[in-house]
Amino acid sequence: MISVAALWRHPIKAHGREPLERIALEVGKCMPWDRHWAVTHEGTKADGSEWARCINFSRGASAPQLMAIVCKLDETSGKLTLSHPELWDLTIDPERDSQKFTEWVRPIMPAERRQSTGIMKVPGVGLTDSSWPSISILNLASNKALGATLDADLSMDRWRGNIHLDGLQPWQEFDWVGKSIRIGTAEFEVCERIERCKATTVDPETGAYDYDTLKSLRDNFGHLHFGVKAYVSKAGEIARGDTAEVL
């Protein structure tokens, strides 16, 4: 049986992950509050009017310590609490506290990289790495297979996905591209594999580089992909423990 092992969202792109027990999904939308905001930097060309590429935002590929941030969102107040092993806990309203946030994150930003300048959102748009409203689905067995090549117990958190599935064979999720699946009461069209970046070579607990996941993917499996991107085609709820199936 294929089942949901974990659910995650990332309210500020690349700046914190939050576990969930259940979530309601809408057709043609990202997971609620996932990548709702992103952090601009000194070279950002995005103006907040439309989706923009990840190069416009501060991210773990160029600032590895960001990978160790965890967060908790209060949906009622819109306030977000951020935690990092080397910083104090910070509670902010991302709509109003950009300066407070950039001061907080500055100590873990590499000095040679473009520094963060503020928090941006695009109304109604999740700032995922795809120009369409995607939800990422990951396979625990693929992570275990990759870890075996590195003699390591890799944390799933380094992949920054939305839905973690248990009960699959390694890389079986790739066979779903072009197919429809049901998870809980929601349905998805699986659209494409996810190509990975240097952020996945970072330990999400410490923010330090640890394993060269990209080299291992390439050398052992002949690709740089992990997980798949999907489009919500039927609204519904998903929760930890729900089953998943190909339609």
Image (tube, rainbow, N blue to C red):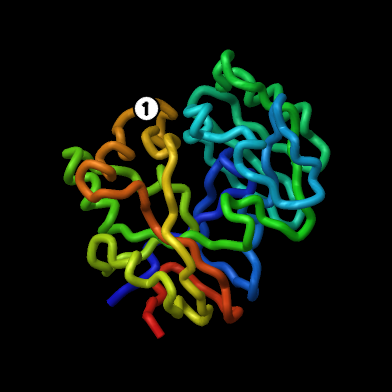
Residue 37: horizontal and vertical position, in percent? Answer: 69, 46
Is residue 172 left or right of 42 when viewed as pictured?
left
Question: Which residue is located at x 28 percent, y 37 percent?
Answer: 215
Above or below residue 53? Residue 136 is below
Please identify the quarter of the rendering in which residue 164 is found: bottom left
Quadrant for the N terminus in the image = bottom left
Above or below residue 162? Residue 84 is above
Quadrant for the C terminus in the image = bottom left
Question: Which residue is located at x 50 percent, y 75 percent?
Answer: 189
Q: Dot 1: few (<14), some (14–19), or many (≥20) neighbours within 10 Å?
A: some
Residue with the most extreme front position: 222
Residue with the most extreme top position: 111
Q: Secondary structure at mark 1?
A: loop
Question: For mark 1, what is the residue?
Answer: 209
**Amino acid on which disc 1 is placed:** Tyr
Question: Which residue is located at x 50 percent, y 73 percent?
Answer: 238
Residue 127 appears in the picture as rendered: yes
Residue 163 appears in the picture as rendered: no
Residue 119: horizontal and vertical position, in percent? Answer: 74, 37
Is residue 4 left or right of 152 when viewed as pictured?
right
- Count of numbered badges drawn on the protein: 1
Residue 199: horizontal and vertical position, in percent? Answer: 44, 36
Above or below residue 131? Residue 118 is above
